[in-house]
């Protein structure tokens, strides 16, 4: 994978330069911002799906056209693109250096829940284009500060390591090849749309992540060039392990072969509960380290109570402790959170990458 040339060498050079100078800021939650708009079914459908069917396809999927689409946030890249672009811009103007595409569920596996598998390439391409347009606008406003589009590949709604049937532990509802094909289709769309890097994100099952990394490598081979890869896992509870049972250190050694630009943790927990695991990655990883936690743990109503100031104080401590190269927010975070986090890390030097022979075993 790493012997191929960069697809966009000038953008990669700017990204590496920025990472060497300061801690870069990722954006915050897309879903949190969309929930504030309280869109109904018609809002999700927009004009294109108003009649109950995608007017752009050949009705080969007609049996699925009557399914409810509310909650399919990725579809809004096609039906309400101005909302998605405005959210990207809000994060950029709050201080984000990198924005993540609205493609967390834009794989055939996840879109099958809505009968919209035929839209996967378009969802990824258009999601990347919207983020690209927002970054380009932000760069015009502040030309001295480059902004970057991170193409997001989410974990899908299935897991290759665990059985969904408690009575049949050997059963799997997805396999490595199916995951790889789904990720490859999504990656092609993201790259076509103009991403600067790809992020395999919210990884709860490392086998899923390995399928994504394998698929990305095949896509790069097909294109004859590559983009930087970012990897972000999720510690699912206070046991300190991913859903597939790995500690942060074991997770790193499982994905290190991909030679990523960064490795990190996001979602599931707030900053306080992620601290020791981010510290572990900062100790063992020979690449950049990222963290974009939730705004605390969800409350009884599924909301998030951690204020921008509280979250920024904790992540600022991460930065002062030398753990971070990239930082942002996940569920429950808003532009106000990102603005506070950006201010907290503004003058803190980034983590220095260790030399390979000095990395702790």
Image (cartoon, rainbow, N blue to C red):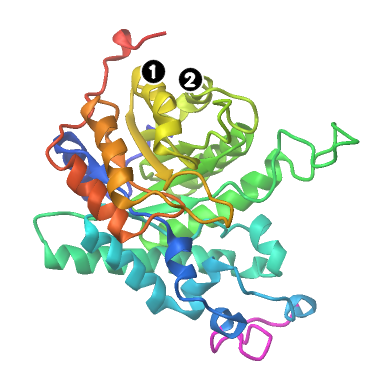
The region drawn magenta spans: 46-61
Q: What residue is drawn where x is 54% and y is 71%?
A: 75
Q: Which residue is mark 2?
A: 249
Q: Residue at x 40, y 40 (%)?
A: 229
Quarter of the figure that contains the C terminus: top left
Query: In which quadrant of the rendered view does residue 276 lie?
Result: top left
Is 215 situated above or below 320? below
Q: Circle 1 is placed at which residue position?
A: 284
Q: Nearer the viewer, residue 154 or 31?
A: 31
**Residue 227 horizontal side relative to residue 17, left or right:** right
Q: Seen in the image, is 138 located left or right of residue 84?
A: left
Which percent across, then down, holds residue 13? 20, 43
Q: Residues within 10 Å of mark 1 (few under 14, many from 20)?
A: some
x and y percentages locating residue 157 in the rendered image: 66, 51
Q: State if disc 2 and disc 1 touch (CB < 8 Å).
A: yes
- Of residues 77 and 348, which is closer to you in this image? 348
Viewer-side residue, 150 vs 27: 27
- In this rendering, the answer to whether 10 lies above or below 314 is below
**In the depicted structure, whether residue 352 falls above or below residue 345:** above
Mark 1 to mark 2: distance in Å? 7 Å
Outermost front residue: 300
- The secondary element bearing badge 2 is classed as helix
Q: Position of residue 119 (x, y in %)?
A: 59, 70
| Magenta region includes residue 50 | yes
Q: Quadrant of residue 112?
A: bottom right
Q: Indicate the secondary structure of the residue bearing disc 1.
A: helix
């Amino acid at each position: 994978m790493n012997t191929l040339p960069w697809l966009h060498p000038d953008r990669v050079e700017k990204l590496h330069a920025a990472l060497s100078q300061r801690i870069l800021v990722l954006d915050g939650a897309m879903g949190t911002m969309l929930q504030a708009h309280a869109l109904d079914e018609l809002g999700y459908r927009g004009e294109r799906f108003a009649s109950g069917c995608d007017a752009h396809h050949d009705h080969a999927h007609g049996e699925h056209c009557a399914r409810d689409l509310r909650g399919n946030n990725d579809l809004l890249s096609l039906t309400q693109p101005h909302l998605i672009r405005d959210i990207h811009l809000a994060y950029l103007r709050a201080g984000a250096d990198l924005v993540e595409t609205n493609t967390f569920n834009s794989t055939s596996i996840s879109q099958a829940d809505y009968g919209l598998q035929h839209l996967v390439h378009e969802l990824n391409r258009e999601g990347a284009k919207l983020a690209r347009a927002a970054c380009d606008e932000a760069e015009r406003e502040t030309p001295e500060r480059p902004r970057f589009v991170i193409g997001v590949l989410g974990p899908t709604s299935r897991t290759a390591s665990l059985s969904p049937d408690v009575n049949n532990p050997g059963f799997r509802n997805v396999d490595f090849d199916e995951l790889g094909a789904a990720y490859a289709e999504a990656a092609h769309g993201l790259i076509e749309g103009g991403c600067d890097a790809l992020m395999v994100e919210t990884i709860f099952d490392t086998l899923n992540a390995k399928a994504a990394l394998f698929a990305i490598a095949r896509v790069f081979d097909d294109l004859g060039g590559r983009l930087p890869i970012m990897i972000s896992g999720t510690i699912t509870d206070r046991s300190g392990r991913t859903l597939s049972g790995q500690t942060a250190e074991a997770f790193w050694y499982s994905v290190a072969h991909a030679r990523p630009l960064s490795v990190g943790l996001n979602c599931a927990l707030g900053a306080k509960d992620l601290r020791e695991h981010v510290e572990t990655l900062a100790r063992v990883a020979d690449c950049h380290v990222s963290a974009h936690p939730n705004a605390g743990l969800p409350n009884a109503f599924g909301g998030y109570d951690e204020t921008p100031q509280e979250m920024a104080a904790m992540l600022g401590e991460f930065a002062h402790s030398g753990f971070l190269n990239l930082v942002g927010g996940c569920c429950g975070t808003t532009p106000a959170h990102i603005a506070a986090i950006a201010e907290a890390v503004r003058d803190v030097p980034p983590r220095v990458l260790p030399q390979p022979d000095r990395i702790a075993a």
